[in-house]
Image: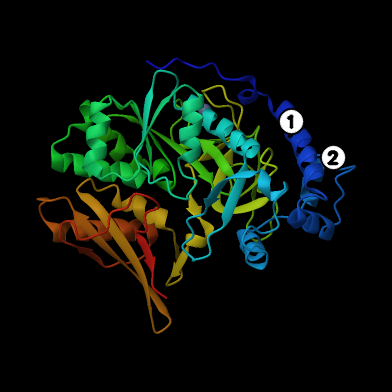
Amino acid sequence: MSIATQLPSEERLERGALESLQGRKLGELVGQLQGRNRFYTRKLEAAGVRALGLRFPRDLALLPFTTKAELTDDQAANPPWGSALTEPLPHYTRYCQTSSTTGRPLRWIDTNESWQWLLECWKAVYRAARVGPGDRAFFPFSFGPFLGFWAAFDAGSQAGVHCVPGGGMSSPLRLSLIESLAIDVVCCTPTYALHLAEVAAGERVRLRESRVRVVIVAGEPGGSIPATRSRIEQAWGARVIDHHGLTEVGPLSFECWEAPGFLHLNESRFLCEVVDAATLRPVPDGSRGELVVTSLGRSASPVLRYRTGDVVVRRSEPCACGRSWARLEGGILARADDMVNVRGVNVYPAAIEAVVRGFPEIVEFRSTVSRSHEMRSLSLEIEPAPGAPGPEALAAAVGKRIREALGLTVPVRAVESRTLPRFEMKARRFVVEE
Ligand SMILES: [Zn+2]
């Protein structure tokens, strides 16, 4: 049995108090970076900013934005660590890298102190997921250089959760551990939660009868796509709690038990802005914009006004859970750089997933954008569950639903069972051929 945890006061601060806390932490951060962190010292100087005399949040707009391209360029110019470090190199004890598809992963290192700060962020995720002492959590995750669930594992142990690593194991072996160790909580990507359910069905493992009551998902937008999350909840007989973070930012947001479909921003540890991606001006609550984040306590490897590329809609109304932290409606709606323009229509992978996951008889899919004669075209392959009747009719139904949702005619083809790839980490179901 898990012990219900009272919300700490930092999660209930009223907005004025929250903003002054953020302002104080931001002032301290800028003070720590200036003169010590070469990358940010250069950027602050170029922007004409002096830490002394800055007043936050009023002066936030004076601070420069940071992009991922600037950071990767900096690491290329100053290999291997770049110049965005605040502490002397021997102080760093952790190494992670981003799961870049472009072949230029970003290296991100932490000190014991900045790592501990990450763990505190993860403890807020566990509180929201109602996971605590007495629970046993399983991490079917490869524990490679991706940040992924490393911090979740350490934070869980510190919070009194019994943590079981599941790296280097086949899916059937993982399923048998979930049963034999009486696992309460599973942490993985939405894709892998679905994959384990598919394997369980083939192995005649009754997942719904396991003790698992919460599946904490991260790493892909699926956890906030209603059709995807309801498939996971159905298959596991458990509650899905979505969580979102970035290697270079940290464990940023999470869903609370009381209000599914939203992600709370951890506003006492991150300063979050939502801006128009073209003008970089703030957009009002309820409007789409790009999420920009400043990590307020990871000063050893910080980001200042970091453009995440995540397209979000923020809501600041009070939440039924009692947290005052603002929420992202519908989670991460899209990644700005994932968008592909096909015959004049902007297509986001999440939009395709939302349609396909609405068909319970489809177990896997892949969409391919190809180019011929300067024209881009999109096609979709779907893999029906073994024994599902009428693959042609199913393909036609998916095509019709996509036409309604995207306004685009997309050829849909049903493929044989087990022909499409399965994924443990970041799924690549959206292939762009250049
Ligand atoms: Zn809430």
Q: How crowded is mark 1: few (under 14 residues within 10 Å), some or many (20 or more)?
A: some
Q: Is residue 430 visible?
A: yes
Residue at left 63%, top 63%?
Answer: 79
Residue 401 locus on image (x, y percent): 29, 55
Residue under numbered circle 1: 21
Examine the image and state in which quarter residue 375 appears. bottom left
Residue type, numbered disc 2: Arg
**Label 1 residue SS:** helix
Choose between 178 and 283: the one closer to the eye.
178
List x then y, in percent, for residue 245.
52, 43
Q: In this view, does 214 lie to the left or right of 123?
A: left
Work out whether 380 lies above or below 235: below
- Quadrant of the image occupied by residue 261: top left
Tell me the CA gap for discs 1 and 2: 12 Å
The response on whether ligand 1 sits within 8 Å of label 1 is: no
Please tell me in which quadrant of the rendered image residue 204 appears: top left
| Direction from residue 324 to residue 152 in the image, left or right | left
Q: What element carries label 2?
A: loop
Quadrant (top left/top right/bottom left/bottom right) for the C terminus: bottom left
Mark 2, ligand 1, within 8 Å: the answer is: no
Along the line of sight, which residue is nearer the eye, 422 or 289?
422
> Left or right: 434 with respect to 47?
left
- Viewer-closest of 272 and 289: 272
Please state the horizontal and vertical placement of residue 217, each as a whole percent of the image.
40, 39
Label 2 sits on residue: 55
Q: Residue at x 31, y 29 (%)?
A: 238
> Is residue 72 shown above or below 129?
below
- Where is the N terminus found, in terms of image quarters? top left
Residue sitting farthest toward the front: 90
Q: State the scheme by which the image is colored.
A: rainbow
The disc labelled 1 sits on which kind of residue? Leu
Q: Which mark is residue 305?
A: none
